[in-house]
Image (cartoon, rainbow, N blue to C red):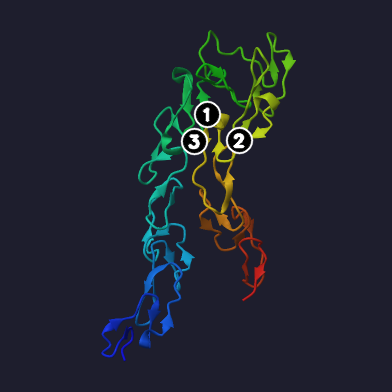
Amino acid sequence: MILGFIGQFCEKNCSEGKYGFGCEHDCQCVHASQCDPANGKCICNDGWHGLYCDKRCFPGTYGPGCLKKCDCKNDGVCDPETGTCACKPGFRGIKCESSCPAMKFGLDCDQNCSCIQENTARCDATNGTCICKDQWKGIYKHDGVIISVADIFYCFTGDVCDTTCPLGFWGDDCDRTCDCNGGSCDQKLGSCNCPVGKTGVEVGCTKTCPKGTFGLSCAQKCPTCSEHSDGCDPATGECICKDAYTGWLCTSPCPKDTFGAGCRGRCSCKNNADCDPATGQSVLD
């Protein structure tokens, strides 16, 4: 009898999922296309490794057996199966090697900045914030509608560009107050212009962006956060990782000696004991 074969003349290969003498043993692989019919060794699918192909690739690796190294730049996250880079807002390119061009921002740099270019030093490639040139200030406008944010002044055209009221005030003499939960209010009407991550003009910008959206006016879609997240931050779009996970898309398990949401906790176990990546408690052998 020959390992990996059956039949009167040992002429038949073991059927899928079987191995050993007489093909009597069941393969124990989890994420594998097959196991060796002679010894049962698992042949892992792309993106997995370990004796039973039950462990995801470590951050920075991908492919068969996780033997290939990722080459994503600027904190891009690579797919553990294909190595394809997922870029953070503000970057693009096969390897996330390029910043957004001038007056572009967001995921894949596909959003247009609404700053008045001649009065603007730069547009933030991550969230589209207008950074005004010296001696310029104002309010952010889009399609003629004022949507200024927090206490940041945005560039606009005008005679002097210094006549906007301070945050929280409105009216001809800037002597009337408004409460917009961190946002500014319309200079003439007093209606709220909600800050990044907030909505609900009629209720003082007290509502958070709906799930799956973020940014100014909640106009941007969240990235494809993994199942190990609680969606994305309504202001920045960054995935909010659950306990034991970290990374831009929350795909990476906590590094050794860290735990908790986003792996921000530091383990304090004694005698070199490992700690649970979710709770930080000691894990006994």
Task: State how far apart marks 2 and 1 are (Cα).
Answer: 18 Å
Q: Quadrant of the C terminus?
A: bottom right
**Closer to us: mark 2 or mark 1?**
2
Q: What mark, if any, has residue 126 been given in the picture? A: 3
Task: State how far apart marks 2 and 3 are (Cα).
Answer: 18 Å
The correct choice, above or below, for 261 with respect to 101 in the image is: below
Task: State how far apart marks 3 and 1 are (Cα).
Answer: 8 Å
Residue type (three-letter) at the residue carrying disc 2: Cys
Residue depicted at 52% across the width and 26% down the height: 131
The correct choice, above or below, for 156 with respect to 151 in the image is: above
Element type at marker 3?
Answer: loop
Residue type (three-letter) at the residue carrying disc 3: Thr
* Occupied quadrant, residue 60: bottom left
Give the side of residue 249 with respect to residue 163, left or right: left
Residue depicted at 61% across the width and 12% down the height: 163
Q: Label 3 neighbourhood size at 10 Å, few (<14), some (14-19), many (20+)? A: many
Instruction: Please provide percent x and percent y for residue 95.
Output: 37, 46
Location of mark 2 (residue) = 209
* Occupied quadrant, residue 207: top right
Depth check: give the residue in front, 69 or 178.
178
The correct choice, above or below, for 59 with respect to 230 in the image is: below
Residue type (three-letter) at the residue carrying disc 1: Thr
Q: Quadrant of the N terminus?
A: bottom left
Instruction: Please provide percent x and percent y for residue 202.
Output: 68, 24
Disc 2 + disc 1, Cβ < 8 Å: no
Location of mark 1 (residue) = 129
Instruction: Please provide percent x and percent y for residue 96.
Output: 39, 44
Q: Label 2 neighbourhood size at 10 Å, few (<14), some (14-19), many (20+)? A: many
Instruction: Please provide percent x and percent y for residue 220.
Output: 51, 34
